[in-house]
Image (cartoon, rainbow, N blue to C red):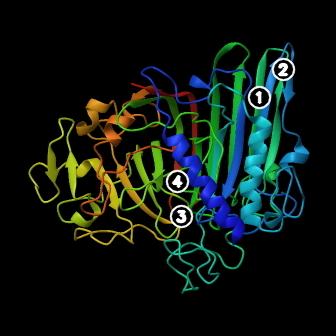
Amino acid sequence: MAMETHLRVVFFLVNVVVLGVSGAGGETAVGDPGMRRDGLRVAFEAWNFCNEVGQEAPGMGSPRAADCFDLSSSFLKHQVSEADNKLGVGQPFPGLAPGAINNTDLYAMQKELYLGSLCQVEDTPNPWQFWMVMLKNGNYDTTSGLCPRNGKKAPPFSPGRFPCFGKGCMNQPMLYHQQTKLSDGGIMRGSFNGTYDLGSDIGSGLDGISFYEVVWEKTVSNGSWVFSHKLKTSKKYPWLMLYLRADATTGFSGGYHYDTRGMLKILPESPNFKVKVTLDVKQGGGPKSQFYLIDIGSCWKNNGAPCDGDVLTDITRYSEMIINPETPAWCSPTNLGNCPPYHVTPNNTKIYRNDTANFPYGAYHYYCAPENAQFLEKPVSTCDPYSNPQAQELVQLLPHPIWADYGYPTKQGDGWVGDARTWELDVGGLASRLYFYQDPGTPPARRIWRSIDMGTEIFVSDKDEVAEWTISDFDVTFT
């Protein structure tokens, strides 16, 4: 308990320091702008349903890994060894707190910090660590009592609300790492891949099993790294998520209550930042694939104060643009509870959701409010209280003409399979106008975004589905 209290104080102080940093116009927020640096920094993290670890997969160590290297003349100088990547509970490493060595959740958090120390690039004044590949399993064993409800420890309850094949369904994946190598043609290439189906051999085929893979490739001194992603669900694992994230380099990232490491050396704040990225969707992942062209995450309390690590009062806030044309608008004139209370136009005009002649219902897939908010406007949908360590709020968007001023997709099919393009999105401008709940009469929260990511959440598929896509040229700049 004493260590947890100390960590919360440290994280709060880090948040305060980082939030004081702002970017000048045209300056980049990421350590590797445009993904053009030959010396790559990339890491891997896997989570269970409530963004914890729970239990390590046999022989895999803690589900954190990194591939970080510098290019020196004609060879790659790696900063992280495979022994580092295989570290698991019970094994010491520099900086590991004694209270974490046998705690799978705290061990993974501190292993990320350790890998970050090996990978860190000492830019002045803002060092940075790595791009983050995030993998998450949506299974939840409701009889386990493993996930808190809005941050409070919750008792077991009846199965059925979430997918789970039985005891062990929240397991961590097998992780295989192909360390980046340099070929004679000047091509650098490496990957992470694996499966949640313990005991399966992915080399014998993928029929009936889950699979994930991220391959990165670049020609020396030329162009961007291209990150190629593949995600496959199975009957046992129908709800899987795979994202490439730019996270905060210190303090919290979106969805976590632990200190993290990442690529955002300066935290972007609405309204003054844009995101540039090239996305090529090869396979969509089926009708349940909530494919995010952009997903931004942060954390502030319902009274507008910044988060400080108290999971009972911290609230994760997300905004996500879903580009799968098979994703419907759950927000409608007959389902106002799935809509935010109002929409704000680019000229700052409010349109309330009961204004059926003017509210852009088709622009919103779903809005849900934090379950612990005390002054919610009815009707309202509340967010799943178990899948984050604290309560959460979601604003999920769909392509619509109303987003044209921000450079976002304006019609179904934009950016989807067969429509690869480079996007320049006014993420900060749009995020400044989205509705997020706040207690009445409290000072407006600073909308400082601690994670920006892209990828898909295949949301409880009823058959095996495959999504494939590439990401390159990723940058975040201040305007």
For the residue labelled by badge 1, is the local secondary structure a helix, a strand or a loop? strand
The amino acid on which the numbered mark 4 sits, given as a three-letter code, is Glu
Front position in the image: 138 or 231 = 138
Q: Earlier in the sequence, mark 3 or mark 4?
A: 3
Residue 421 image position (x, y, % from top left): 45, 26
Labels 1, 3: front one: 3
Q: Left or right: 376 with respect to 62?
A: left
For the residue labelled by badge 2, is the local secondary structure a helix, a strand or a loop? loop
**Residue occupying the point 29% across, 36% down:** 410
Q: Badge 3: few (under 14), some or many (20 or more) residues near its Cα, within 10 Å?
A: many
Q: Which residue is mark 2?
A: 183
Q: Are marks 1 and 2 in contact (CB under 8 Å)?
A: yes
Q: Badge 4: few (under 14), some or many (20 or more) residues near its Cα, within 10 Å?
A: many
Q: Are marks 4 and 1 in contact (CB under 8 Å)?
A: no
Q: Which residue is mark 3?
A: 388
Q: Which residue is mark 4?
A: 457
Q: Earlier in the sequence, mark 4 or mark 2?
A: 2
Q: Give how far apart the Cα atoms at labels 4 and 2 are.
A: 34 Å
Labels 3, 2: front one: 3
Q: Quadrant of residue 153?
A: bottom right
Q: Give how far apart the Cα atoms at labels 1 and 3 are.
A: 34 Å
Above or below 35: residue 16: below
